[in-house]
Image (cartoon, coloured by chain):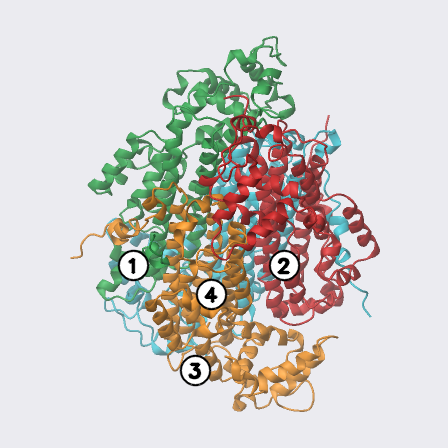
Chain colours: A red, B cyan, C green, D orange
C-alpha cells in the first residue's frame, strides 16, 4: 500500500522555500527587494525546466523515422507547443512584477551581484538551442561564452550536438508526400499557363498577384523553392519550403490542419520569445539606463542587437510573403483531395 | 574582497531544479503532465513566500505606535500592497497554464496523489491569516483542520496570535485625528440643518441623496458609524469607520491620498484573492466535475462556499454605500484644510 | 475602377466619433469621467456585434443537415468559437479600464442616467440567447423584461424562435455514428464483464474507478446516458451525451480532434462569460456598495444570482465526472479505429 | 423633469452599430473576416478618442501658470495618465483578437482596401503630437504626410501649434523650487569634498559610484545638468533635468511623491506605446511577410524604424543612469526636509 502523500513533501517545499539567500543579508545591508529579485528568477527557472520537459518530449516524437498521422503524435507535439506558448505568455506578464522594483530599490543591492547576470541562465540557453538557435549565430557569442563556467559550456555543447526542433522539422517537411509526389498529381489542370505542373502554375498565379513594388519577390520565390544553392546556409531545403507553403495554402483539408497549427505555433513561440526579449530590454533600460550590466555587458544594447538575430523560425515567417488569395488557388485533383481527408464520410 | 557571484549558485538552482519527483515515475506509470502539476504548484509557493515577505514588512510598519506621515512608512505600505496585487494578478493568469492540462491527462496521475490536496498549502493559509481571515471564520474549518499535520496547525495558531493587517488598520484609523478632533472643526458651517457638527451634517446630506428603495441604508449608517454595540462582532470600530469614510470623501487633500490608496489597494487584494478562488473553482469543476477531490473534499462546493465567506475587507467595501456626490460635500473649515496640506505652497 | 479607400471614411469615423453625448454636459455639470463611461460601453457593443457576426456564421453551418468532416465546416466553427473566446478575454480585461473610475467620480453623473442600465444591452442578451440561454431560464426574468422597450422585447423573441447553438449541437451529436453504430462495433472485446457491448463495458470500468463517497455517480451515469425520461428537461439527449463522452474519451483519433476542441471551446466560452459576470459583479459592488442600480435593480445581488443560473453548457461540463483513466479505456475494434483516421497513412 | 434615459439611445447605438460597411460586400466577395477588421479598428478609434479626452484635461491643468500642490491638480494629472496606461495595456492585448485572423483570411479582402492604411489614423497621430512627438522628428515624415488628406494635415498642424505635454512638463520642472533654491539649502553639509553646494557634492558621489567602463558617464552628467549649449536641441533644460533627478532621488518625501509618479507614468506610457508598435510590427510581419502594405509602405520596415525614433520621454529615461545608492545620498538640511512634508505631524 502506498504511503499517504502530503502536499509539502510532495512538492519538496523544504528545498524550494529554503533557497533564498540575499547577498545583502550577508553584508548586513538593508535591501528589502532582493528577495523579490531572487524569487522571480527562481520562478523563471522553474518554468524553463518545464519548457525543457515539453521540448524533450516533442523532440523524441520528431526523432521517430515516421510520424503516423493516425497516431496521437502530431496532436501531442502541437498541444505541448501551445503549452510552451502559454507559459511564455505568463512569463512576459511576470515581468510586471519585476517592474514594481524601482531603480533606486534595485541599486540597494545591485552591485553585490557582480559579476553574475541573466546571461548565465543556462536553461534559457538550452531552450533556445533545442529550438534551433546555434551558438555560432548568437549576437556577441564571445562575450556570452566568456560568462559561463566550464560545466555550463559543456552542457550547451552537448545540447547542440543533438538535432534541434527546426532541423527535425525540416526532415519531417521533406518527407511530406502531397506537395511533390507526382503520382498524386495526375489529372491536375493548371489554372494559369498551359502546363500541368502545380508549382509552375502556382508561380504564375503568385506573379500575377503582385502589385507595384513587389516584383523582386519573384526572384526570391525562385530561390526559396527551387534554387538548391540558395538554401545552403539555411535550415529549410527547397523541398521543405514547398511542403510548408503547401500546408499554409491548403490547411483546410483535414490532414493538413495539425501541420498548419504546428507551423503557426512555432511562429507564435518565436514572437513570444521576441516579446520577452523586447520587454526585458525596455525594463533593463528603465532600470539601469546607460549603465553597465552586473555581468559587464552594455545591458540594453546587447538585448537590442539580439532581438533581430535571435528569430529562430524566420524562414517559416517569410513564407507568408508567398501566399495568394484563396479564391485564386489552383484546385486539387479529386484523388489527391480524397487522400487529404478522412476515411469516414 | 567578495567572492564572485555566479547566477546558478546565487539562485540555489541545485535545490530548485532538483525538487521535482513525480509519483508516477515511482510507479513506472507514464504521466507526462505530472511535471507541470508539480512545477506550477512550486511556482505558486515561491510567490506565496514573496507575499509573506511583503506582509511581514507591512506588519512591522503598522506595529509602530505611530506612523509618521512625513516618513516613507505609508508609501512603503502602499507600494508593497500594490506589489502583492501585481503578484496575485500574475497568479490568476498562471491558472491558464494549468488549464492546458486536460481532464484525461490529469487522470493519468491524479489518484496517486491522495490524500494530498491544495488545502495543505500552509503558506496560502498564512497569507490569509496575516491579512485577517481567522480560522474560526473559515468555511468548513473542521475539514480544513483535519487535513493539516501537527506542525502546520501550530504554524497557523502562531500566525493568528499576532495581530493581523485588518486589526492594525483599525487601530491606525482610530488614531487618525481629522474626522473626529473637535479642535480642528471650529468654524465648521453646516450645509444641511442647523448644527455645526460634521457628522450630523453629513448624515442629513446622505439621507437626502437616497432614492426610493434605499431608505434602510439610514439605519445601517447609524449602526456603522455610531452604534457601539453593533461593532462588537466586527473588526472596525465606529471611529475607524468614520475615519475611513472621511478618507474616501476627502481623498483629494494631500495628506489623505496615501491613506485612500491604502484602503483602495486592500479592496483590490480582496478582489484578486476572490478572483483567484473563483477561477480556481471553475478549473476544478472542469477538471474533475462532481468527483471527490484528492483530499476527500467535494472540491468545487468547498471553493464556492468559501467565495462568500472569505472576503477579508468587506467592511471597507461596504463604506462605498455611504458616499454622496462630491458637489454636495460639506466644505471644510479653512484651518482644517490647511492641516491636510503641505508646508510648502 | 474602384474609388480610393480612405481610412476614416472606410471606418465611418464621422459616425463613430460623433456619438458621445454626456448627460452631464446637457446639465452643465462637470463630470469628466462620463466620457469614459460612454466609450467603454460603446466599445463593448462593438464587440458584441462582432460576436453575433461569428455566431451567425456558426449557426448557419450547424443548420446544414450534414456537416461534412472533409469540408472546412467544423474547422471554421471551432476557429470562430476560439475568436469569440479571445474577444471575451479582452472584454474581461477591459473592465480594468472601468475600474480606474472611482466611486466618487461615478457619483458625479450616476443619477443622471436613471433608469438606463446595462440590463438594456440587447446585443448581450442576443449573444446569450443564440448560445442557448432562454428567457424562461433567466434569473429575475420579470424584472429583466420590464426593463426593455417593445422593439427590444420583440428582437429577443425572434432570436429565441431560432434554434440555438446548444440545440444544434445536440442534433449534431445525435447524428455522430461511432459511439452507437452497432455495425462498427463488431469484434469488440469487453475488458470488463463478459458482454460485447461497449457501453456496458464502460459502465463497469467507470464503476470500478470510483472511490469512497462517489457511489451516487453510478445512478447519475445511468440517468444521463440511458434514462429517456431523465433528459426530458435537458438539452442533451441520452444519445448526444454518449456521443459527447465518446469524443472526450477517444479525442486522440484524428476525426474526433475537432469535435473535442468544439466541446472544449464551448466550456471555455461559458467560463469566460461567467468570469465576465463575476468581475462585473465585484466591480458593481465596489462602485455602488449596497445602493440600488440606476435601473432600479439591487445591482450586485442580481449579478450574483445570475452567476449560477446562466451557465449554458453545464451539461457538457458535467460529463467530465464520467471519465476514466486512459490506460483503462476499452480498446476499439481495428475496423472502427480505421474509420476514425485518415485515408493516407 | 428629465426624460427617461434608455441605454441604446444614450450610447447612440443606432450610429455605432450602423457603421460597418465591408468593401467585400460591395464587391460581392465572401470575406467573413472583414467585419472583424472594421470593428477592431473602430474600437481602437474609440479608445484614441478617450485618450485625447484625458490628454486635453491634463494639458489644461499644465497650462495654468501655477499648479498648487495643495489642490487636486497633480493628483488628477497622474490619475488620468494612469488611465491612459490602462487603456494602452488593453489596446496591446486587443491585438490578440486581430491575430485570430490568418494571413489567408486577410488576403480575402486586403487588396480591396488600397490605398487606405493605419497611417491615416489621425487620432493616433494627435495622441503622439499632444504628448510631444513632432512631425519633423518622425521617421519617414514625407511618406507619412503624403498619406493624409488636406483636412487631416491641417488638424495635425493645429495640434502641433499648441504646447505638448513634454514642453509643459519642462516648464513645470523649471518652476520647482527645491533642487535649486539657494535659500532652502542653507546649512547643507557636503558628504563628498569640501563644498557646500548640493550638485557639486552629488557629482562627486556619482563619480565614485561608477564602475569600470562607465567613466564617460561623467561627461554626460556635465552636459545634461550644466551645459546650456547641450540642451539646445532637447526638450528638457539643465534646470528641468536637475529638478527631475532630484525628484527621483528624494521621492520618499511627501511633496515629491506625486511628481515621481508623474515622471514614472510618462515612462510607462512611452513603453506601452513602444510595445504597441512592436507587437503591431510583429503582427504585420506575420500577416503580410515582405509584401507591400495597403498604403504602399514597406510595412514592417517602417514600423521597425519608427520604434527607435518615436520614444517621446527618452530624456526622462536617461536620467536613470545618474542615480546613486540610496544609502550614499546627501542628507538634506532640516529646514528643507520640513518644507518637503505635511503641515500636520
Residue under circle 2?
A: A308
Disc nearest the viewer among 4 and 3:
3
Marks 4 & 2 on one chain: no
Marks 4 & 1 on one chain: no
Residue A208 on image: x %, y %? 48, 47
Subunit that carries the residue with mark 4: B
Subunit that carries the residue with mark 3: B
Residue visible at 56% across and 22% down in the picture: C340
Residue under circle 1?
A: C14
CA neighbours of label 3 inside 10 A, class few (<14), some (14 to 19), many (20+): few
Q: Is residue B126 left or right of residue D22?
A: right
Residue under circle 3?
A: B345
- Distance of label 4 from label 3 (alpha carbons): 21 Å
The reply to whether discs 1 and 2 touch (Cβ–Cβ < 8 Å) is no
Residue under circle 4?
A: B259
Residue A245 found in image quarter: top right
* Disc 4 secondary structure class: helix
Disc nearest the viewer among 4 and 2:
2
CA neighbours of label 4 inside 10 A, class few (<14), some (14 to 19), many (20+): many
Amino acid at each position: 500500500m502506498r504511503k499517504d502523500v502530503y502536499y509539502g513533501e510532495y512538492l519538496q517545499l523544504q528545498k524550494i522555500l529554503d533557497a533564498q539567500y540575499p547577498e545583502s543579508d550577508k553584508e548586513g545591508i538593508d535591501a528589502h527587494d532582493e528577495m523579490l529579485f531572487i524569487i522571480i528568477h527562481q520562478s523563471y527557472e522553474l518554468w524553463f525546466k518545464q519548457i525543457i520537459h515539453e521540448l524533450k518530449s516533442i523532440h523524441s516524437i520528431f526523432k521517430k523515422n515516421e510520424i503516423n498521422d493516425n497516431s496521437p503524435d502530431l496532436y501531442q507535439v502541437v498541444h505541448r507547443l501551445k503549452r510552451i506558448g502559454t507559459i511564455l505568455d505568463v512569463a512576459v506578464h511576470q515581468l510586471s512584477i519585476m517592474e514594481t522594483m524601482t531603480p533606486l530599490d534595485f541599486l540597494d543591492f545591485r552591485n553585490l551581484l557582480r559579476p553574475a547576470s541573466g546571461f548565465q541562465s543556462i536553461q534559457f540557453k538550452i531552450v533556445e538551442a533545442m529550438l534551433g538557435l546555434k551558438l555560432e549565430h548568437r549576437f556577441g557569442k564571445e562575450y556570452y561564452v566568456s560568462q559561463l563556467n566550464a560545466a555550463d559550456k559543456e552542457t550547451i555543447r552537448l545540447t547542440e550536438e543533438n538535432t534541434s526542433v527546426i532541423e527535425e522539422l525540416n526532415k519531417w517537411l521533406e518527407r511530406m508526400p502531397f506537395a511533390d509526389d507526382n503520382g498524386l498529381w495526375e489529372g491536375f489542370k493548371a489554372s494559369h499557363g498551359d502546363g500541368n505542373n502545380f508549382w509552375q502554375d502556382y508561380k504564375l498565379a503568385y506573379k500575377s498577384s503582385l502589385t507595384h513594388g513587389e516584383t523582386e519577390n519573384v526572384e526570391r520565390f525562385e530561390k526559396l523553392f527551387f534554387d538548391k544553392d540558395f538554401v545552403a546556409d539555411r535550415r529549410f531545403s527547397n523541398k521543405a519550403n514547398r511542403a510548408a507553403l503547401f500546408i499554409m495554402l491548403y490547411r483546410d483539408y483535414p490532414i493538413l490542419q495539425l501541420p498548419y497549427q504546428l507551423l503557426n505555433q512555432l511562429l507564435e513561440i518565436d514572437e513570444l520569445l521576441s516579446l520577452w526579449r523586447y520587454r526585458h530590454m525596455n525594463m533593463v533600460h528603465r532600470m539601469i539606463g546607460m549603465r553597465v550590466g552586473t555581468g559587464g555587458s552594455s545591458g540594453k544594447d546587447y538585448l537590442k542587437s539580439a532581438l533581430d538575430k535571435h528569430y529562430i523560425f524566420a524562414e517559416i515567417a517569410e513564407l507568408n510573403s508567398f501566399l495568394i488569395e484563396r479564391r485564386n488557388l489552383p484546385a486539387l485533383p479529386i484523388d489527391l483531395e480524397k487522400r487529404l481527408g478522412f476515411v469516414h464520410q
